[in-house]
Amino acid sequence: MLCRCRRVAPADLGRAARGWGWAGAGAARRRVSTGWSPVGAAFDARQQRSSVVGRSTGLFGVPELSCPEGFQEAQEKALQETERLVRKAYTTPPGPEIVMIFDQLSDALCRVADLADFVKIAHPDYTFREAAEEACRNIGTMVEKLNTDVELCQSLKQLLADKKVMDSLDPDTRRVAELFMFDFEISGIHLDEEKRKKAVNLNVRILDLCNEFLMGTHLPNKIDKCSLPEHIRCNFIVDGNYVQISGLHADCPDDLVREAAYKIFLYPNADQLNCLEELLCSRNHLAQLVGYNTFAHRALQGTMAKTPENVMYFLEKLSDRLSQRTQKDFEMMAEMKMKINPQNTKLMPWDHPYYSGVLRAERYNIEPSLYCPFFSLGACMEGLNSLFSQLLGISLYAEQTEKGEVWCEDVRKLAVVHEKEGLLGYIYCDFFQRADKPHQDCHFTVRGGRLRENGEYQLPVVVLMLSLPHSTRSIPTLLTPGMMENLFHEMGHAMHSMLGRTRYQHVTGTRCSTDFAEVPSILMEYFANDYRVVNQFARHYKTGQVFYAVLDQIYHGKHPLKISTTDILKETQEKFYGLPYVSNTAWQLRFSHLVGYSAKYYSYLMSRAVASMVWKQCFAQDPFDRAMGERYRREMLVHGGGKEPMLMVQGMLQKAPSVEDFVDALVSDLDQDFETFFMDSE
């Protein structure tokens, strides 16, 4: 689509700087080079607040966004620029300028939509969030209208139909032109006027339903406090006569606390269920309206997997290979549960996350309290800095912010600098917990990179959002294995954004197929797990992901669904997860990835398989190999979405992997001799 939005880990689009007060590359170098400081110090316990210098500005340095009303001004400017560019596209003859105009058009819309997409979720001020959400909806509506604009599409069709001109274009320009046409096609450009309007209305309704469903996934459930045993109430928030349950408490050692949290938090909500059903039906209706059998068939166009049939083949193959191992693990967890609680030996869904961690700690003698003090946030950031320096020639520096530039005083701003190429872009680190902040680790593109008309390169700007505990006066923020792995994962997305330096913002950085976008981030988890990089062990993926991915495919498959979404959950859980469904629960109503990764949740598994192959073939022998780091940048990172994902994988691995290769890679991760791994690390 004209605005290619993807929030990663579950939103990324490019931003044009023109008229927005963004500093260009040269200006940025002059402004910040004297204000850089070591990255580790920025996250030290002694530095509680982000440094603020200079004049006042707006969010991310955008002057208009010094107040919520600035979003209205920003979107009006974007829409005016959009109108100008559309008129220009109507009259421009076939040639490379058409592609440039389309990219500028996309950029004009995205520079508001991306920034607003982050602010509506993360800003602590409700008025900012509300203004950003309204801007998102208005820009989104305009995008859908443009995606069904016949005259606009015709200008691109004329270019694609002119063989002589197309043959004269470079591969990147041809690829971007074809992607723009693909976006028109999946939006229903071939339909008559009445049906095109219907497609626009469906898309707008789907946007509203997605927002409604996402909000519902995070809302707590309440229960009369007398319904819970008194001795476990202290684990939850007590609000008058009610106990508020806002999560699964999966790490709590008390079986009863986990059981209560599971049953209450996942208790079905009628409004949320209706919202999900309407969302799935609307997606299916849209897909069939524009010519696809199911929404999954539409969503998987342009991915590595290609079709839902290929996805299910991959998932079923993987499930078959993992089934015996999963059953053995469940038996071991049940034995462990029996030792702790002889009165209750049956393994239930609320037990798996906790006892898998206990089993892992016991098997490999892992005790987080023994090594967490060695892994403060500052130390981990220095470790990442060292890794990037050796692997890619990149350093991270903390930069002071101006008043109004950040939305919370503990946000840090990092400059990403290459040893030869200079400043590559900026990373805003929103790492710490606060009230009303989603407990969700994400990477957001606020501005995508692109080559401007004046020859300068527009620097990318991203946000990494985590939910880490605050430091104290005497103790810095200490990371558990999971926290450290998440930090490395999100930083992998950030490096993809920094190094995906394409000519066109439409395909820059993480704006690529979903099942490829997770490869750089998951590859970073392998570095996090390697003792030579951080000298510690971290977790591996859980087989439960197969269950989630299959459920996602069924929900977005053939409609109408033969049974309810809850009955589908029950059947799929019993077949692919191996643990019993619990009556009066509806886990799917908390499955927020049904919004951001609709029909594409399998991407985590397929991306992990690719990352596993890249790690073993290219980095396992030497994780600091500079030659391999440069090859990784050249073959996989630099293209963004400007090259077919499987071609990038082939370039890195020097082969085209099959489904069997993907499955083998995932299974072999579980077969590694971790006892040897730990002996080697000592």
Image: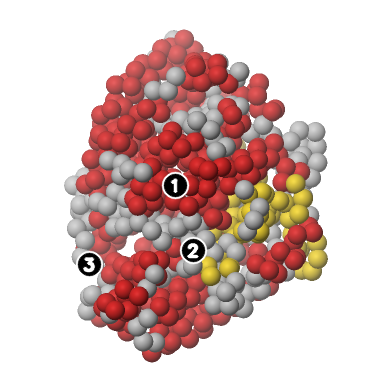
Of callouts 3 and 1, the N-terminal one: 3
Task: Classify residue 614 as left or right of residue 402.
Answer: left
Residue at numbered disc 1: 518
Write down the quadrant of residue 585 in the picture.
Answer: top left
Of callouts 1 and 2, the N-terminal one: 2
Mark 1 is surrounded, within 10 Å at the Cα level, by few (under 14), some (14 to 19) or many (20 or more) other residues, namely: many
Q: What element carries label 3?
A: helix
Residue at screen point 25% across, 81% down = 193
Label ID, residue 289: 3
Q: Tell me the distance, in whole angstroms, between the alpha carbons under discs 3 and 2.
A: 34 Å
Write down the quadrant of residue 426 in the picture.
Answer: bottom right
User: Residue 63 location in percent, x, y?
Assistant: 68, 73
Q: Tell me the distance, in whole angstroms, between the alpha carbons under discs 1 and 2.
A: 18 Å
Q: What element carries label 1?
A: loop
User: Residue 442 location in percent, x, y?
Assistant: 53, 49
Q: Are marks 1 and 2 in contact (CB under 8 Å)?
A: no
Residue at screen point 45% across, 13% down = 336
User: Residue 557 location in percent, x, y?
Assistant: 23, 50
> Mark 3 against mark 2, which lies toward the viewer?
2
- 325 or 575: nearer the eye? 325
Position of residue 613 relative to residue 301, above or below, is above
Residue at screen point 48% across, 52% down = 634
Position of residue 9 relative to residue 351, above or below, is below
Residue 334 in view (yes/no): no
